[in-house]
Image (cartoon, helix red, strand yellow):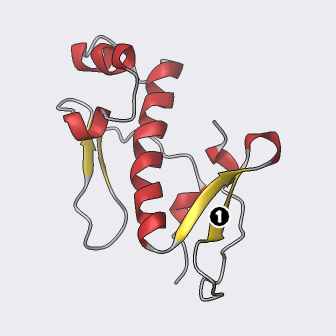
Amino acid sequence: MRVPTTFHFVPRIPDDFHWWCEIEGCYYNIDFLNLTNENLATLDGETAAKLRLQDWSLGDPWVRLAFKTMVEDHRVKHLGSWGLRCTEGSYGVYTMGCTRFCNHFSNNARSLGPYAR
């Protein structure tokens, strides 16, 4: 099992405001124009409320950070289901490690690079 390459990069908000999970068979999505409670669950109340008002621009740094946080939260759930976990290392860089006593993941210690918070 290899962690998808896309997991190593900060996600970009699509031009149509609609992000779909890149994992085959997963139908999770984030529709910025119709956000669900599940999408907003990891955000603080103020950020979630501002997003729901739809009074923002894709260029707003806080909007990009909120999107990154929502996607990262979903991706971390996939990692957990594969027996991987993320831990914060030096300089805020996250690394992945196997949560089982095994070596079946071919990249179980690769840096998540852009997933520094």
Q: Is residue 101 left or right of residue 49?
A: right
Q: Secondary structure beneath disc 1?
A: strand
Specify the farthest residue to the right: 90
Q: Is residue 17 visible?
A: no
Give the labeled residue for mark 1. 96
Between residues 85 and 67, which one lies in front from this camera angle? 85
Is residue 93 found left or right of 45 in the rendered image? right
Q: Residue at x 37, y 63 (%)?
A: 22
How many numbered marks appear? 1
| Residue 59, image x, y percentages | 48, 21
Q: Nearer the viewer, residue 20 or 38?
A: 38
Q: Quadrant of the C terminus?
A: top right
Point 28% across, 39% down: residue: 39
- What residue do we see at 49% from left, 20% from top? 62
Q: Tag 1: Cα neighbours inside 10 Å, few (<14), some, or many (≥20)?
A: some
Q: Residue furthest front?
A: 101
Q: Quarter of the image holding residue 37?
A: top left
Residue 76 position (above or below residue 105): above
16 shown above or below 60: below
Answer with left or right where residue 100 lies relative to residue 31.
right
Q: Is residue 3 visible?
A: yes
Which residue is located at x 53 percent, y 21 percent?
61
**Which image quadrant for residue 49?**
top left
Q: Amino acid at mark 1?
A: Met
| Residue 2 place in picture, x, y as percent | 55, 79
Percent from the top left, x then y, of residue 6?
Answer: 52, 61
Would you place residue 18 above or below residue 33 in this image? Answer: below
Please provide percent x and percent y for residue 66.
Answer: 44, 29
